[in-house]
Image (spheres, helix red, strand yellow):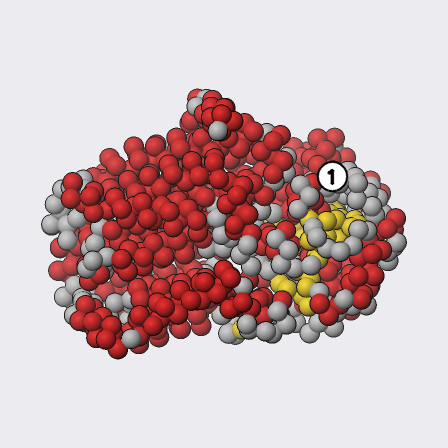
Amino acid sequence: MNFLHRLLAVTHLAFIGILVLLAYPAAADEYPSRPITVIVPFAAGGPTDVVARIVTASMAQTLGQKMLIENIVGAGGTTAATRAARAANDGYTLIVGHMGTHAAAVPLYSRLPYDPQTDFAPISPLAGTPIMILARKDFPAKDLQEFIAYVKANTEKLNAAHAGVGSVSHASGELLNSVLGIRPTGVPFNGTGPAMDALVSGQVDYMCDQIVNAVPPVRSGTIKAYAVATPARNAALPQVPTTTEAGLPSFQVQAWNGIFAPKGTPPAVIATLNAAAAKALGDEAVRNRLLDLGSVIPPPAERTPEALATLVKSEIARWTPVLTQLH
Amino acid sequence: MVELFSNLALGFQVALSPINLLLCLIGALVGTLVGVLPGVGTVATVAMLLPITFGLPPVGALIMLAGIYYGAQYGGSTTSILINIPGEATSVVTTLDGFQMAKQGRAGPALAIAAIGSFFAGCVATVLIAMLGAPLTQLAQKFGPAEYFSLMVLGLIFAVVLAKGSLLKAIAMIVMGLLLSMVGSDVITGASRMAFDIPELADGLGFATVAMGVFGFAEIIRNLDAGADIDRELVQQKITGLMPTKQDLIESAPAILRGTMLGSILGILPGGGAVIASFAAYTFEKKIARDPSRFGRGAIEGVAAPESANNAAAQTSFIPLLTLGIPPNAVMALMVGAMTLHGIVPGPQVMQKQPELVWGMIASMWIGNLMLLVINLPLVGIWVRLLRVPYRLMFPAIVIFCAIGIYSINNSPLDVVLAGAFGLLGYWLIKHDFEPAPLLLGMVLGPLMEENLRRALLISRGDASVFFTRPLSAGLMAAAALLLVLAVLPSLRKKRREVFGESEN
C-alpha cells in the first residue's frame, strides 16, 4: 500500500519534528532562543491582525527570531486573551490586545476569566485607529453641527448601526450617544462589513466606525463622513475635520492595540521586547504602512510598558460607565 | 463593449504571466484538496495561507487565494458523493443524490458532472463579473433585513419540500436546526443563550462540528453497524463507467444552465449566498422535474444543479468586493485583509487605479476553472478507486481527517468532543428515519433568519407589516406561501406520500 507507506513517512517526520521541538529548550540560553508566538484575538486580515503582522515582522528582525502569528477567534477576542493570560510567562507567548479585550470586555462580560490589569505584563502600545462619525449619503445634514441638531431632534426615528455587541463600532457609538445624550435604536450587524453595507444602501442612518473601514465608501461618495474623533486630521481622509474643529471636542476616541505578555514574565524579557517594539514603530517602512491604513502611531515617549498600563487603566475607567448602563 | 475586450485582454496578459499561472495552479490544487478533506474549511485555509502571500506580488497573492476559494467548491462535492460527508456547507445537498449515485456504482459520472457543471458555471460567472458587476451590485443593495428574512422563510419552506419521508419529521429536524443555531451570544443584546457558561459555546455551535457529527460520524457508525455492509459493497463493486454517458449529459445540461443562473444571482447577496444557491437550485430542479420521485435516489440533475449553483455563487460573490469594496462573506472578508496587507484599499477606485489587479484576477478565474476541469476529470478515476479501499482502512482515516479538520477551525478540543456527541445523535436520527439535511439547513439559515427578523423589526419599530409592504420582500413571501400551500394541500400530500412513502432510509 503506497498510501500506507506515505502515511508512515509523514508520521515519522512528525515524530522527528516533535523531538526537535522538545530538544529546543535545552539549547536555550539567551532570550529569544526560539520562535515567539504572538496571539491575535481576531481573524487573519482584520485591522488588528494587519497591525500585528506589520509590527512583528520588524520586531522579528531586531530580535533575530521568528514571530509566529496565531489567530484565535471567539467571544469578542476574550477566548484568545484568556489563553494568553494562562500561557507560560517565559516570553515565548505574547498577545496583541486591544480596546475590546483589555478594556470594553470588563463591563461587557460578567464572568471575564482574566483581569486586563493584573493578568498581563504590558510591553508597548502599537497603534491607534481613529473613529469616524459616518452617515448614509442622503442623511439631511451637511456638517457635524447640523448632524448633532438633527439627531437630537429626531432621536425617535433614528437607527444607529454597529458591528455587534462589544465591537469597536458598538462601544464608540454608545460613547457618542452618551456624549450627545440621545438613545436611538441600535441595529446590530454581524461585523463591520454588513453594517457598512447597510449604511451604504441607506437602511440605517449613522454609525461610528474605524477609519480603515470607512476609507473606501467615503472616497467613493457612497457614505458621508462628518468628523474624525482624534486631535489631528488623518492623512487617509484629509478633507474630514476633527471633532474639535467641527464643534464636538468631548468626543475623542480611537481603537487602540498594544502588545502584552502574561504576568510574571521576567523584566529583562519585557525590556528586550519593548525595545524591539519601540524600534519597529520608529522604522520608516513600518510607519508608512501603518499610516497608509490610517493608523495613529504612539510618539516615542509613549512606547513604554507604563504607557500601555496607564492606557488600559484609563480605558477601563472610560468604558465601564458607558457600557454598563446597557445591561 | 470595446472597453470590455481591452480590459479582458489586459487581464489575460496579467493572468498568463508564468508566475501568475503557477500561483493560479497552486491555488486551484490547494482548493481542491481543502474541498476534498472533510472539515478543513475554506475560511480556515485562506486564513492560514494569508500570511504566506505576504511575500508575493499583490496580483499573484489574490489570484492564489481566489483559486483556493473556487477550487474548494470543486473539491467539496467529492466527499459528498463518495462518502456522504459534505466537505463544505455548500455541498450538503449534493449528498442527497450524489451518494445515491455512488451506491448505484455511478460515482464516476456524478463526480464528472459536478466538475463539468462547475466549469460551465465558472465560465458564465466570470463573464458576468466582467460585464455586469456594477449593476448587479446595485440589485444586491436593495436587499434589506426584511428581504433577507423573507428569503430565509422561502429557504426553510424549500427545506420542508426537499425532505423525503415524513413531513412532520422534516419539520421537526428544521426546528431542531433552528434551536441549535440559537446556542451562543444573542446578536442584539450579547446575552448568552444555551451556552451553560462554557466559553467555547459562547460563539455558538460550528457548522462543521455539527455537519461532521450528524453526517460524517453518524454515517461511519451506521456503516459499522451490523447489516450495513451491503451498502459499502454496493459502492465498491458496481462501478459502471467513469464518464457520464450521452444520456447523462442531455439530462443534466438544462439543470446546469438553471443552476448557474440561480447561483450567479444569489451569490451576489451578502451572507450565505452560495449555500442558499445550492439548496435553491436543488429544490427548483425537483419542483420542475417531470418525475420528482427520482430525486434522492440518484438523479443526475440533483448533482448537476447545486454544484453549478455553488460554483457560480462562489465566483459572483467577488462582485460586491470588487465593485464596492464590501465583502459579502467570511472568505471575501479575508480577501479584503489580503488586499490591506498589500497596501490596497478595496473599493470602486481599485478598478480605476489598478485595473491590472482587478482584470488580472477576473481573467485568472477563467483560467483557474479550466485548470480545475483538467485536474478534476482525471482525478475522478483515482477518487472512485479510493472507494475500493477496504472500509476497515477507510474509516479510521476519515475519522482522523474529520477530527483534525474540526480541531483546526478553532483549535478547540471541545469541538471534537461535540462532533462525537452529534455523531451519536445523528446515528439515532438515522435509525429513526430522521433526515439530517433539513437540520443542517435550519442551522445555517437560523442565525441569518433571526438576525434579519429582529433587525427588520428594530428598524420598523416593531411593525411586522414591513415584510409584506416592501415589494421584493412581499414577492418572496408570496412565493413561500405558494410553496407551503402546495406542500400541505391534502391532495398533494397524498401524492407526496405515494412518491416518497417507500423511499429508502
Q: Is residue A169 above or below residue B196?
A: above
Quadrant of the rendered image containing residue A151: bottom right
Kind of residue at disc 1:
Ala
Give whichever of A151, B116 is nearer the camera.
A151
Evaluate whether residue B389 shows in this view: no
Q: Which residue is mark 1?
A: A236
Secondary structure beneath disc 1?
A: loop
Locate residue A118, reporting x and y percent: 73, 61
In this rendering, is residue A172 above or below B334? Answer: below
In this orientation, which residue lies closer to the viewer: B266 or B436? B266
**Quadrant occupied by the C terminus of chain B:** bottom left
Residue closer to the observer: B456 or B311: B456
Query: How dense is the environment of label 1, judged by Cα within 10 Å: few (below 14), some, or many (20 and up)?
Result: some
Residue B203 higher or lower than A280, as above or below: below
Which residue corresponds to the image point at 30% horizontal and 43% vertical from the top-left?
B117
Task: Check the image and report above or below for B99 versus B167.
Answer: above
Residue A32, percent from left and from top? 64, 40
Residue at figure coordinates x 42%, y 67% from the top left: B478
Left or right for A5, reference A239: left
* Residue A239: quadrant of the picture: top right
Q: Is residue A228 visible?
A: yes
